[in-house]
Amino acid sequence: MPRQLISLTINGREREVAVEPHWTLLETVREALDLTGSKEGCGTGDCGACTMSVDGRIVTSCLMLAPQVNGRQVTTIEGLQSNGSLDPVQQAFIDTGGLQCGYCIPGMIVAARNLIDDNPSPTLDQIREGLAGNLCRCTGYTKIYEAVELAAERIRGGA
């Protein structure tokens, strides 16, 4: 099958890329666009390591086909930083020790950022629910939840 040209805005930058119709969004981002922050953990949409935001909604990019993002806005972990500064969610994960090996963290941070964008004052139960699609094999999640609480506070202007 011939490659298909798609246009997308990725991390605020308009791009065109030729993709095979069977390529996933994750494959396209990592291989064709050389944005390697997002990881493939399971390849079945169960772990959340590949979480990205498409038009403001989180998706498991290992399951979404690249042609499905034609004309859409995609944000990866690389798109969260601004002017060389980490996003408050990224910084909070560092400050609280909410990361271990780091493999799940890009997807976890993208999901957390979307959660805070939708709900600037999430409760602990809402944080748990918002991150339920993201699995971490290294932690007991306590530090991750603390990171999201701290990030939300900082984004609201509390610190």
Image (spheres, grey):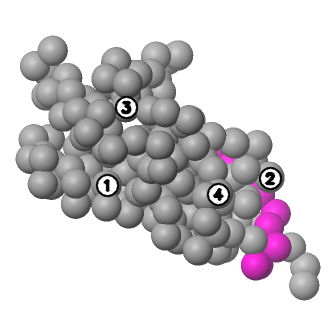
Q: Which residues are magenta?
A: 12-22
Image spot of residue 9 (x, y percent): 57, 51
For label 3, the residue is: 98
- Res. 7 image quadrant: bottom right
Q: Is residue 152 visible?
A: no
Residue 48 placement, left or right of 148: right
Task: Please state which of the two labelled residues, at mark 3 or mark 1, is closer to the viewer.
Answer: 3
Quadrant in which the C terminus is drawn? top left
| x 31%, y 44%: residue | 141
**Would you name the residue on which mark 4 appears?**
40
Eye-nearest disc, 2 or 4: 4
Q: Position of residue 110 (x, y in %)?
A: 42, 46
Question: Residue at coordinates 15% horizontally, 54% vertically from top-left?
Answer: 126
Question: Is 98 within the magenta?
Answer: no
Marks 4 and 3, Cα distance to the nearest angstrom?
20 Å
**Label pair 4/3, CB-CB below 8 angstroms:** no
Residue flagged by tag 3: what amino acid is it?
A: Gly
Q: Is residue 27 above or below residue 156?
A: below
Report the Cα–Cα distance between label 1 and label 2: 28 Å
Q: Residues within 10 Å of mark 4 (few under 14, many from 20)?
A: many
> In which quadrant of the rendered view does residue 113 lie?
top left
The residue at which mark 1 appears reads as 131
Q: Residue at x 32, y 38 (%)?
A: 144
Q: Which residue is mark 2?
A: 32
Q: Amino acid at mark 2?
A: Ala
Q: Are marks 2 and 3 in contact (CB under 8 Å)?
A: no
Q: Could you tell me how far apart the alpha carbons at marks 2 and 3 are, in whole angstroms?
A: 30 Å
Cα distance between the residues tagged 4 and 1: 17 Å
